[in-house]
Amino acid sequence: MQALEKIVITTNWISIILVFLLSIIAVLKIIDSDKLKGYVFALFNKGFIEDEVEENTSFFSSFYSLLFIFSSVVLALVISFLVAETNKNTSFSVSSFFLILGIIWSYFAVKSLFEIGVIRLFFIKKEVRFYVVSKFGYLYSISFFLLILFVLFRFGPLNLSFFKAVTLGLFFLKFVFQIVNNKNLIFSKLFYFILYLCAFEIAPLLIMFKLVF
């Protein structure tokens, strides 16, 4: 009888990533537990975003840096999993996870540089401060819910269809709340907002989609 090579796919790296994410949450709670709680529910708390705008804290502080790392790692984990489920030629592996994490970091880095350049060029920092803070605040907020959803799916009874539906629903809610809570700015500058969406939101996402698939 011919011996067949046994291929073992380990998922231990997922547990390591989850422990890493929980460690970040623990550190964030030590730094500022109230602010952490605020960002968890920021999607449903416009007043918290307004307080953050008034506080005018640097995005490069330790708290916000850790929050950004947490959010991007969660997004990479969820996206790499969904890509593996959608494209059967791609496995849900540590290499695909780090590839997508690198793409996400590159996406945010390039987009942020362009946004900062436009804001400084047209001196509109004060006018778009709430929009920028709310955009990141809502992203951080849904990242916490995505982590809970991922854990429930991996170790609980949730099926794939439900996971996909709730994930899309969270991003849809983020978009809706962002439009509603910035409606005065958006509808007063609708043409420029559409240009912004095309140049800084839709086009980079399409490029990232092409790179991944």
Image (cartoon, rainbow, N blue to C red):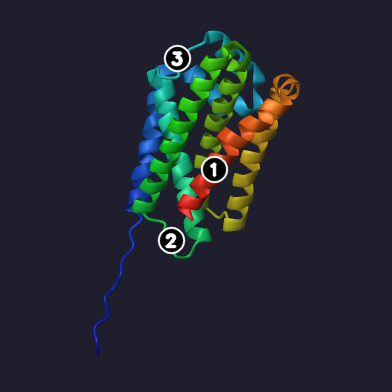
- Closer to the camera: disc 2 or disc 1? 1
Q: Which residue lies under the disc numbered 3? A: 58
Question: How far apart in space, not on screen, are marks 1 and 3 (Cα)?
Answer: 26 Å
The crowding category of the residue bearing disc 2, from other C-alpha atoms within 10 Å (few below 14, some 14 to 19, many at least 20), is some
Residue 187 or residue 31, whichever sits in front: 187
Residue type at the position of mark 2: Thr
Taking 138 as reference, is 5 above or below it? below
**Label annotation for residue 205:** 1
Q: Nearer the viewer, residue 204 or 150?
A: 204
Q: Residue furthest front?
A: 121
Q: Is residue 15 left or right of residue 54?
A: left
Which amino acid, mark 3?
A: Ser
| Classed neighbour count for the residue bearing mark 3: other residues with Cα under 10 Å, few (<14), some (14–19), many (≥20) | few
Closer to the camera: disc 1 or disc 3?
A: 1
Please name the residue shown 42% across and 39% down the image.
Answer: 73
Would residue 67 be seen by someone viewing this image from the given angle?
yes
Q: Quadrant of the N terminus?
A: bottom left
Q: Amino acid at mark 1?
A: Leu
In the rendering, which numbered label is found on residue 130? none
Q: From where the camera sits, is residue 155 visible?
A: no
User: Residue 120: image x %, image y %?
Assistant: 52, 15
Describe the element under mark 3 as helix, strand or loop.
loop
Would you call the spot at circle 1 few (<14 residues within 10 Å), some (14-19), or many (20 or more)?
A: some
Give above or below for 77 relative to 185.
Answer: below
Which comes before the other along the chain, label 2 or label 3? Answer: 3
Q: In whole angstroms, how far apart are the C-alphas of marks 2 and 3?
A: 38 Å
Looking at the rendered structure, the secondary structure element under dot 2 is loop
The x and y percentages for residue 176 are 70, 33
Distance from disc 2 to disc 1, alpha carbons, whole Å, reads 19 Å
Among the two numbered marks 2 and 1 on one chain, the one whose residue lies closer to the N terminus: 2
What mark, if any, has residue 90 been given in the picture?
A: 2
